[in-house]
Image: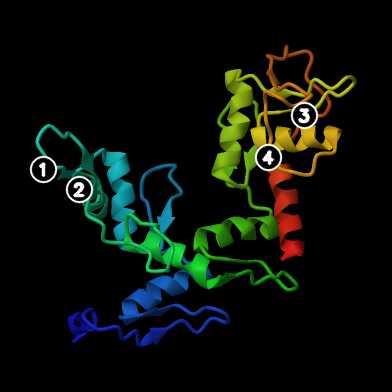
Amino acid sequence: MKHARTHTSARSFSCKEPNCAFAFITSGALTNHMRSHTGERPFACQEPNCGFAATRNERLLVHMSRHSGKRPFACTEPECAFTANTRTAITIHMRRHSDMISFACVEPGCDYVANGARALREHASRHSGLRPFSCTEPGCVFTTMKSGKLKEHMRQHSGERPFACKEPGCEYSAMRKDTLKTHMRSHVGKQPLVCTEPDCGFTTTMTSRFTKHVLGHSGEPSPAFDNSNHVHRIKRQKLSPSAEPSNTVDPESDMESFSARRQVEC
């Protein structure tokens, strides 16, 4: 009976959370989905010093393969050495050899093709405007298409900063993994972007932030930015350890302020 439902469009198990329109073929799939609302992650990695936990046992098994290094799924195409740690990953890879198009958007005029059903569902929500994941904090109207984005947003309320810098003596931590990555450039000596406007000591490692800053000098409203023709030139120069500018931007605080503005605008 359970298998027979996969051949029909019947989705009898619906999410009861307010503003969530997800429905599933099986009760087990609904149970897994509900964890995206509750935050429950019952499947924890047992490796020492690894805090990973998953909503599903399958995802924990995939994670464990990263510790073991096992990649049991190999491409069968001649002269292709690709291997994967999941059946899904090898299936997606094999489509590159066959040029098989299985997950194409059905919206008129949209030629988007996804590499899997989940990616296609996320894309389809852009057409429908459906944002099923809502912030539960009182007075916060934030909604998003992805559970992962909601999790990132909730850290702004809780103050959680799970991504810590590993450099000795550095106490920096971030809410997002990509923000920590930006921070790490300050340790490896990557040259930051420095404003060349007279008497302006602004510097940042983020090109998007630097572009916005330079446009603030010129008064140009458009986000488009031409490096070659703009009156200010983008220079990458290495700062001496003793001459760190006073206007150095913390990318994490910048991201938080942007998210806050977006929330108000929504």
x and y, in percent, of residue 7 in the image: 21, 80
Quarter of the image with the C terminus in it = bottom right
Q: Rate crowding at label 1 as few (under 14), some (14 to 19) or many (20 or more) other CA atoms within 10 Å.
A: few
Q: Which residue is mark 3?
A: 248
- Three-letter amino acid code of the residue under disc 1: Thr
x and y, in percent, of residue 37 in the image: 52, 71
| Label 1 vs 3, first from the N-terminus | 1
Between circles 3 and 2, the one closer to the viewer is 2
Which SS class for mark 4?
loop
Q: Residue furthest right?
A: 199
- Three-letter amino acid code of the residue under disc 2: Met
Give the distance between the C-alpha atoms of the residues marked 1 and 3, in whole angstroms: 51 Å
Q: Which residue is mark 1?
A: 76
Q: Which residue is mark 4?
A: 224
Q: Rate crowding at label 3 as few (under 14), some (14 to 19) or many (20 or more) other CA atoms within 10 Å.
A: some
Q: Which residue is mark 2?
A: 94
